[in-house]
Amino acid sequence: MSVAVEGPPPLVYSPRSLAEALALFVPNPQAQLFAGGTAWHTEHLTTSIMLPPVTLSLHLAEDLRRITYGERSLDLGGTLSLNQLLSVGGPWVPSILKEAARVIGTSALRNLATLAGNVCQKGILGDLFPALHLLGAQFEIRNLRGSRWLTTQQVAEEGRVALAPGEILTRVRIPQEDWPQTFYQKIGNIRTPWDERLAMMGLARPKNGQLEALRLSFHLPHSGLIRIQSLEAELAGQRLPLPHRVRSQAQERVDEALNQLPVPASIFQRDRVLHMMRWILTRLDDD
Amino acid sequence: MARAKKKSAAEDPHFSPEKELFHPSLPLLLAGVTIRSEVPHARIVGVVHPPLPEGWTMVLPHDIPGNPMFQVLRSRFPVLGDEVVQYVGEPLALVAGPDEDEVRWFASQVRFVTKNLSLDEFVEDSPHLKRKKVIGGDKTQALMGVAGTMEVEGVYSSGPQDHGHLDPVEIMVQVTPQVVGVRLKTQWPAHVVGSVARALDRDPNEVKVLGTVSSGTANSQVWYPSLLAVHAALLSQASGKPVSMKLTKEEEFLFSPKRPEARTLLRTTLAPDGRILSLMADVVVQTGAYGVLDDEMLDRTVVGILAPYKLGHFVVNAHAEASHTPPRGPVGGLGEGLGLFAIESHVHDLCRALGQDPAQWRTEQTLTKECSSFSGVPLRADSPLKMLIPQLARSSDFSRKYAAYELMQERLERFQEEALPLRGIGLAAGFQGNGFLAGGTNPVNVEARLEQDGRLSLYIPIVTANNRLVQLWKESAAAVLQIPVTDVRICPVFTGDHPAGGPSISSRAFEIVPRLLLQTCEGIAQKRFRQPLPITVRKVYRRNKGPAWDSDDFSGKPFLTFSWGAAVAEVELIPLLAEIRIRKISLLIDAGPRIDEASARNAVTEGVQMAVGWAITESIQWENLTISHQSFLRYRLPGPRELPPLDIQFFEGPKETAPRGLGSLGANLVAPALLSAIRQAVGPDLKSIPVSRKMLDEALRYHEASFDSER
Amino acid sequence: MKLPLILNGDDVTLDGDTRESLFTVLQREAGVFQEKTNCRKGTCGRCHVVLDSKEVPSCLVPFFQVKQREVVTPEGFSQTDEYRQFRLILDEEGLVECAECTDVQIFHLFSYLELFPQAGKEECRMVIGEIPCRCGSRPVLERGAARWLERKEAVRVGRR
């Protein structure tokens, strides 16, 4: 039998629960996690599945796919597939997160791709993180000794979810807040040159002729995330529709932020970001 | 070499497609791999490789027993690169062994030692530039223009395109002393037969090609499968075993023929009423290494420019430019689409300069029966475009929308503030030429055999996946002989007895086969009950001698038949996303009666999708004379956002009896119509395809800047 | 590594390596996906299977994950009544079969409708568009999908 791989076959464990998975880290501290496997493989064309020497495959751990509905938050299991996320009915899952998930790959791919996989593999450059960031999500990280929570702010500063050996991202907690207006636009996909790709998302809460709250971010693969929380704070409380002067100043702030990106945005990305900024600010309206 | 007496393909006892000759699990099947050049242009001085394991086979150029040159019509190039490499990826050697992965590893270790060419060698071996100059009327007036008239000039470019099929490429060959069996997907089985026979120095009657179904009718791998078949056959002959050769997807994308890039400068002078008084064209068509089919493609490109409209004086300087990149091929057509793209895009500029409605201008300027064609052939009737264009313009509401969208351009402030979509509508007219210019005289034959068990075997020189056509052929044959349809089978076996099998892309076979099929079945019906079974009847179609095409003179009738059409494309540009959305595409086609309406629509739809990809989504970048890896990863066929509702209508004249080809019409017409629509929406300076988001962004910035300056 | 699984309704045991994809093992061991290639990125749709009622690209599924699970391939689905009924509709709409994608498209569409039964015509259009192909069958598939949805709705309304 011909197999297009070399070397001894990897050791693969398929734990049936989180507890079992964590216990397996004891004899195998360097074991690596395998969820859907899509984020890695869609960028590397191989005829075989590239596995590390010791693999923990989480496909049988049902407790890592649970959805828990709380009073003020929604908990999504780390290995929930994107289609499972999209199948959650009602208003529980914010539409902006569903929009971000819906444009990832094909529907078949979304049956494999997982929430944690997208967040851990791609970090802040992944499609889901910007939406989670805007929503103020938190990530539960567990190991044998206990658990810790990471905020998206911490992840944004780090650039990624840093999992130490023996840790698993088990839950994503999303606060349940009311955002009457949501904005989501994505340009391009994995086949688009990086300098022609970006996404924009926004959450707005207009009330009684005022902008009660606004969250806004732009996501440029290769360049990073633009979110100016100080600008969001300044715009909160403004009367609607926003005056021209306010809109212009907001655009200038975004323009400055573009200039400060570690990897400069392309002309195309810059143009689109400014266009989208202008577009959103003119669309904020009273409920 | 003396030829064996011709036997009917149906009588050959040595070969039967039903035999498990090419079963994938055939024991002793070797896996073959092509070893390719890693440099674009150098002299080969030697080869270094690991020791060849026992039971493996390697073939180098000097091992080719027959003719080492591969031939496609008048083009010739080495089966395996021998002295001087001409492009990265050029096949230089072949290797076969029991395990594909091990063979690929071995192939990766083979090194061809090369040295740079000397300056003299370099100059002598420079990629050639095939030139053609076509003059009509007064050359000076054509070049200098007519004084005191309006002059319009533009440069129009089109990019390369991949055939886009995801079928795996796998060729299986078994060479025995009696027969050479080849199993592959091909549009041109006769060419496979001839190529394999020539390279192996075998009688073509000993080469049997089992054509498996290829994908649709637009698979434009016309000659490339034959080259792969030759490679596999060489390995099988050398090893004495059956050989399977597969191309990886990347290998296929990087090295299989692409649609040629083209760049055309057009300069016309116009009378106030819109007549073209003079036309000067400078065309460059990139044909890649060896200039394969350059004559055909160049001539057809020029025909595409000159054929549709009345012209005064004209000069066309056309160049087929070979280069140190993989050979290009007839993807999406054999060349007239390149010329039509240029002239139709230029007509967009003419109409803007004149302030005329594009439908009206075209209707007035197409040829009438008082005219002669550009090649001097008198017309016996008005060009079909004279009727097709106004009819399509009416049904698509073209003129009203065109005028309305022109007005939209004057209301830029709304666009900027509200980011409303910009709209455009474009029209293009043109044709598809049926039959090769260079080789249109081959006969087409169909053979039918009524077996002893009462079943009917049909040997038809086309390989098609079109289930409906196949069913129609079976039903018409069954009806003549009054046998059940289930007793009729199509035999996709091709031998030297069928020299004119394909390529299907040239469409002649689709026009002629139904007639021949009926004749063969009627022939059997006459002999039935009078002669013992089996009964075999063969009918041959030979082209009537008529005006031939003189490529040197550019005179005569270029094609056996023309199919004509017009297309309207309506688009919307979303400024926020710098994205084109196609709202609707309408076509009106005159290609004679349809054998099967659904098949005709399917073929046109394929062409339209090809055009959308060519114009918008499919992009190939070259890096160091090879296709970039990123191009391979990112190559994208049009998706649902780019494929709008289609309105396809057919026109049929009252006296028409024979269908004509229409597989390339969609591609030929829709690409320039789309570009015209995009240009109306966003800006006149877009003159090349594919139109990328960056290009749209730049055009939008220009839009805004001109708005800001007006304010 | 020999793993038992249910393939198109039959209990089978397939032999594969830990690092092999399900696609590779099915192609080699079970004769499935003959004359099919795939992009190895999960985007071309040619290797899709339904794994425990969820459609997945088998080129990205490690073989070791399918132990004692149920796999349905397009070949298996083509033996069902649903497939036959839908093919009849497509034939009426004028389908010219594409050797590359017809069965794959039908399989993909029906797998999607299994997961998202409320999908409408526009959504189905997008789903059909997820399988790239050069062939001209897309408009026919879209019309066929629209008719199928209408028929489902008529049955549902009839039941009420």
Image: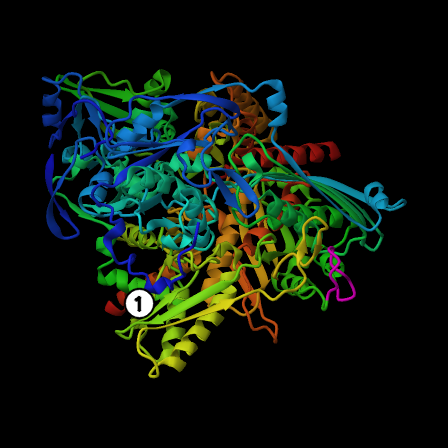
Residue B541 placement, left or right of B364: left
Q: Which residue is mark 1?
A: C154
Question: In the rendered structure, the residue with mark 1 lies on which chain?
Answer: C
Residue A26, picture quadrant? top left
Q: Between residues A247 and A115, which one lies in front from this camera angle? A: A115
Q: Position of residue C62 (x, y in %)?
A: 21, 35
Observer-nearest of B360 and B77: B77
| Residue A236 position (above or below residue A94) | above
Which amino acid, by three-letter code, is at mark 1? Answer: Ala
- Which residues, given as a range, are shown in magenta? B368-379
Indicate whether residue B161 is drawn in magenta.
Answer: no
**Please, is residue A184 above or below residue C73 in the view?**
above
The x, y position of residue B690, in whole percent, is: 56, 40
Please provide percent x and percent y for residue A176: 30, 34
Q: Is residue B375 magenta?
A: yes
Q: Is residue C51 visible?
A: yes
